[in-house]
Image: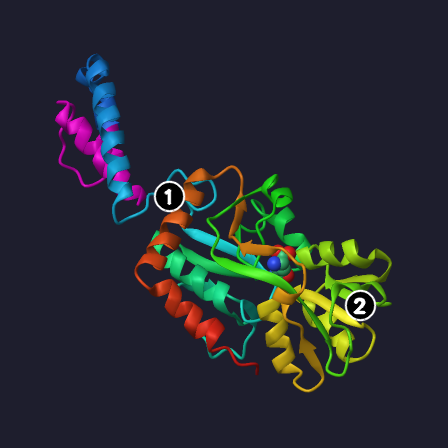
C-alpha cells in the first residue's frame, strides 16, 4: 500500500509540471524533482498538487484496499496478536491440524475463533499475522510493545477503555459458573457460601467473583489451571464466560457442569479486539475488515466452524 501512495504523489508532481522522468521508482523521481531549479520555483504549485494527491490517496484507501502506511504499529506489514490460549473455543492449543494461511508465527499451534478471525482480518488489510500466547493479565500492558492487538474474548469495559481502543463489538457474552457435576450450587447466593471460587487473573469473572465473595476468590494464571483445580476438588466453582464454560464442561464431561449464565444476575458483555490508543489508522482498518466480514457472510461461517461446531478434544 505504501507503493500506491507514492505512485499517486508522483502522479501529482508530474501533473504540476515538475521533473518528468518516467522512472518507475518514485524515490528517484522525487529526488530529481527536488534537484531541479524549476521544482524549487514551483513550490506553490507543488504544494497544491500534494494536497490534491493526498485527497486522491484518501479516496483510494476508502475503496477496496487499506492504506496502513500511516499506522504506527502495522506499517511494517506484520500484526502481532496477543491472546491467552486457555479460552476454548475462542483460543486454545490445538493439535496443529488447523492451518491459517496468513499466520506466519504461531508457536503453540493456537487455534480457535479469534485466531481464524484475525487471520481473515490480516488478509483483508494486507498484513501477515503472528500469534503470541501469554498470561491474560499481561496482555493489556503489552499492547503497543510486545503485541499490536489483542484478540482473546476480551470484554469491552469502561475501565479498559481508559487504556486501550476497542474495535466494534464482535460477540455477545455473559459470565457463567462451572461447578462439580454433583454440586448443589445454582445461584449467586450459593457462591457466597463457597470457600474457593477459581478465576483467571484480570478477567471480568474475577471482578464478579470478588464482588460476590472476595475472601473465597482464588486468582490463578489460566483458566486451564482454575478448571483443573475444580476437577481436583481444590475449588468449589469457577466463574468464566458461558461459551468457554460449556467447552470445558465438555472436556471434563461427567465431572463438571456449566450453569446457565442467563439465570444468574450477570451483565451482558461484548467482546472487542483491543488496540493501543495511539493508532486510529489501525482501528479504522480493523473495524472496516470486521464490518466487511459480517456483511459478506465470512464472519458467520467462522462462528459456525469454530464456535457452533466446536468439539472438545
Ligand atoms: N471475557 C473475559 C474478560 O474479558 C475473559 C476473557 C479471557 O479470559 N480470555 O475478562
The circle on residue 68 is: 1
- Residue at x 77% of width, y 66% of height: 198
Give x and y (percent) for residue 78: 44, 53
The circle on residue 190 is: 2
Q: Is residue 28 or residue 219 the one in the foreground?
A: 219
Q: Quadrant of the C terminus?
A: bottom right
Crowd around label 2: few <14 · some 14–19 · many ≥20 (10 Å): few
Q: Closer to the N terminus: mark 2 or mark 1?
A: 1
* Residue lying farthest to the bottom in this orientation: 254
The circle on residue 92 is: none
The CB of the residue at mark 1 lies under 8 Å from ligand 1: no
For this view, does 31 lie left or right of residue 180?
left
In the image, is residue 219 part of the stretch drawn in magenta? Answer: no
Q: Is residue 291 or residue 146 the one in the foreground?
A: 291
In the rendered image, the vertical position of residue 181 relative to residue 218, given as above or below:
below
Give x and y (percent) for residue 283: 44, 44
- Residue at x 57% of width, y 69% of height: 243
Q: What is the span of residues highlighted in magenta in the rendered image? A: 1-30
For the residues labelled 2 and 1, the Cα–Cα distance comes to 51 Å
Q: Quadrant of the N terminus?
A: top left
Amino acid at each position: 500500500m505504501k507503493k500506491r501512495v507514492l505512485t499517486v504523489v508522483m502522479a501529482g508532481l508530474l501533473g504540476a509540471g515538475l521533473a518528468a522522468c518516467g522512472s518507475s521508482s518514485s524515490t528517484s523521481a522525487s529526488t530529481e524533482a527536488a534537484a531541479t531549479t524549476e521544482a524549487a520555483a514551483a513550490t506553490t504549485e507543488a504544494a497544491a498538487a500534494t494536497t490534491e494527491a493526498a485527497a486522491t490517496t484518501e479516496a483510494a484507501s476508502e475503496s477496496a484496499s487499506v492504506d496502513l502506511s500511516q499506522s504506527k504499529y502495522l506499517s511494517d506489514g506484520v500484526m502481532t496478536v496477543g491472546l491467552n490460549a486457555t479460552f476454548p473455543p475462542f483460543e486454545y492449543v490445538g493439535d496443529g491440524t488447523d492451518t491459517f494461511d496468513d499466520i506466519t508465527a504461531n508457536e503453540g499451534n493456537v487455534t480457535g475463533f479469534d485466531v481464524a478471525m484475525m487471520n481473515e482480518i490480516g488478509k483483508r488489510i494486507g498484513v501477515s499475522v503472528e500469534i503470541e500466547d501469554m498470561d491474560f493479565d499481561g496482555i493489556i500492558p503489552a499492547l503497543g510493545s510486545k503485541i499490536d492487538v489483542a484478540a482473546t474474548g476480551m470484554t469491552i469495559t469502561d475501565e479498559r477503555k481508559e487504556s486501550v481502543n476497542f474495535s466494534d463489538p464482535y460477540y455477545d457474552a455473559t459470565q457463567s459458573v462451572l461447578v462439580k457435576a454433583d454440586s448443589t450450587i445454582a445461584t449467586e447466593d450459593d457462591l457466597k457460601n463457597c470457600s474457593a471460587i477459581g478465576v483467571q487473573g484480570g478477567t471480568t469473572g474475577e471482578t464478579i467473583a470478588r464482588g460476590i465473595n472476595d475472601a473465597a476468590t482464588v486468582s490463578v494464571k489460566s483458566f486451564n489451571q482454575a478448571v483443573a483445580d475444580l476437577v481436583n476438588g481444590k475449588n468449589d466453582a469457577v466463574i468464566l464466560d458461558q461459551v468457554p464454560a460449556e467447552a470445558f464442561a465438555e472436556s471434563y464431561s461427567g465431572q463438571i457442569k456449566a450453569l446457565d449464565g442467563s439465570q444468574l444476575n450477570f451483565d451482558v458483555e461484548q467482546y472487542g479486539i483491543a488496540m493501543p490508543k495511539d493508532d486510529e489508522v489501525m482501528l479504522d482498518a480493523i473495524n472496516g475488515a470486521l464490518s466487511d466480514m459480517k456483511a459478506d457472510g465470512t464472519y458467520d461461517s467462522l462462528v459456525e466452524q469454530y464456535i457452533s461446531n466446536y468439539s472438545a478434544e
